[in-house]
Image: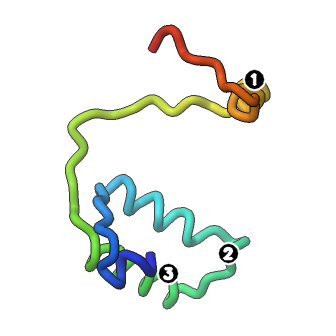
Amino acid sequence: MDLAAAKQILMCVSEAVLAEYKEVLNRPRLKLSPQRIARSLAVIRKTSLPVEPTRTITVIKMTTRTTECWNAPTPPVPTTW
């Protein structure tokens, strides 16, 4: 977020991504104050380019097998999508 605030990168965010940022920033383990969360979200909104997704993706649930594949010295090449 510091890079975006300094205009060194341009974040492109949809409303769904903003909602996810809000959900993550509100997690109790982060112990962020409501004011800090509001400021962070304001910076994201002010410095990012709003986008509308044209497609959706399916998230692959993490399993032991996917973790093993990602951590393999040579990850397997997918043969189908």
- Position of 76 with respect to 6 (left or right) is right
Do the residues under discs 3 and 2 have CB atoms within 8 angstroms? no
Identify the amino acid type marked 1: Arg
Residue 67: where, in percent of width, then height?
74, 32
Label for residue 30? 2
Residue furthest bottom in the image = 35
- Position of 58 with respect to 76 (left or right) is left
Identify the amino acid type marked 3: Ile
- How far apart marks 3 and 2 lie (CA) works out to 10 Å
Q: Which residue appears at 57% of the width and 17% of the height?
A: 77
Classify mark 1: residues with Cα within 10 Å, few (<14), some (14-19) or many (20+).
few
Identify the amino acid type marked 2: Leu
Between residues 47 and 52, which one lies in front from this camera angle?
A: 47
Q: Label 2: state its secondary structure.
A: helix
Q: Which residue is mark 3?
A: 37
- Earlier residue among tags 2 and 1: 2
- Position of 43 with respect to 52 (left or right) is right
Q: Nearer the viewer, mark 1 or mark 3?
A: 1
Q: Which residue is mark 1?
A: 65
- Earlier residue among tags 3 and 2: 2
Between residues 32 and 71, which one lies in front from this camera angle?
A: 71
